Image: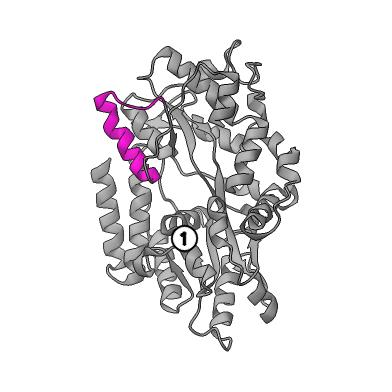
Amino acid sequence: MITEFNKVYPNITITTTSQGSYDTLKDTVSNAIPAGTTPTMAYCYPDHVSEYLAAGAVMKMDDYINSTKYGLGVDNGLSDGAQSDFIQTYWNEGNQYTVDGAAVNGVYSLPFSKSTEVLFYNKTAFDKNGWTVPTTWDETWDLCKTIKATTGYESVNPLGYDSDANMYITLSEQKKIAYTSGTGDHFLFNNADAKAMVTELKGYYDKGYYKSQATSANGAYTSTQFTAQTLLMSIGSTGGTTYNYTENFETGVAALPQADLNDGKVIMQGPSICFFNKATADQKLAAWLFYKFITNTNNSAIWSVLTGYNPVRTSSYQTTIYKDRADVDGAKGLVKKVADFLADSTNGYSNWYYTSPAFKGSSTARVEMGSLMGSVMLGTKTVEKAFADAMANCLFAS
């Protein structure tokens, strides 16, 4: 995309640098803020931006978005469409920030590489045994019991959940259990309902119904265990779709199980892009033009086809690039299966997307929920101890 962008703007030089994981990237940028060495633009998650905002380092993008000369939909040779073409749940993530408990007006991050979670399942085994893909958590736990009682599957953990934090946060969202708030007292998770939920999950874990990354040897992803057939279902990011492919069986794709099918919730994740105040005016404009290019209708579709992430523009779903791609076999075939599932307007999956409040300390809360789940399931902490430690660590970090 840089090469193609330079065909339009050959005078702009773009240097890309990998910083490892998203958490490492956040730490690197945070350390660069006081040193005045921030990049011009960077991948980000909302809780990262909240920390950058608190330090006064991240740019408000409204003037660029609405510019009559360079704004979205203005023809700068980049073929980008208007703001209204963006999927609004993705777009709105960038204007819902708070600092010191107060809402901050304006757009401070812009969508780029979005994903969600789905249930990957061993369709070959399901078809062989006549198992029905679960739609609710009650059905899921009943199926896990059935699988464990089926000859040949006694030693299998039926379900895997790649992200311990997502499991906790999503189930809290589905069950309407308080987790965090962008205003007032930020950390609300230390409550009786949350403790009861984790206690229930501990019971299912002890029965061998599910595993997670935190409870797996050497922190193995459940997608890896899924393709090795020691798990029959794995809940994970659509951005990691290819890791759920194997030649040894057919992988099916289904919706995340729900607590209430009439009020579904599934996490919206994947990085956005933010821009930094330290850059020069020319660097800021160049970065903005590059952002317009990489998120135009065709490029958003191309990125989705190559990676498995979701297009951020509504129009991308209708392109020939997206709809009529020829790669229907192997891992790319599974990417297409996931894409078709997400693009199916009849299933209403995109209506279930949610995001947690972003504020300084929200990234700590997320990390702590993952640690809490792992320690309780493995029995290294009691439920009470795990919640008390998580709350103390969150309050200290904030």
For image coordinates 67% across by 25% down, the residue present is 81
Visible residue check, residue 185: no
Q: Nearer the viewer, residue 14 or 83?
A: 14
Q: Which residue is mark 1?
A: 162
Residue 379 within the segment the image draws in magenta: no
Q: Main secondary structure of the magenta part?
A: helix
| Residue 30 locus on image (x, y percent) | 30, 34
84 left or right of 283?
Answer: right
Q: Quadrant of residue 249?
A: bottom right
Visible residue check, residue 255: yes
54 left or right of 334?
Answer: left
| Part of the protein shown in magenta | 21-40
Asked if 226 appears above or below 194 in the picture, the reply is below
Residue type indicated by callout 1 = Asp
| Residue 287 locus on image (x, y percent) | 48, 22
Q: Nearer the viewer, residue 234 or 172?
A: 234
Residue 27 within the segment the image draws in magenta: yes
Q: Residues within 10 Å of mark 1 (few under 14, many from 20)?
A: many
For image coordinates 38% across by 19% down, the residue present is 279
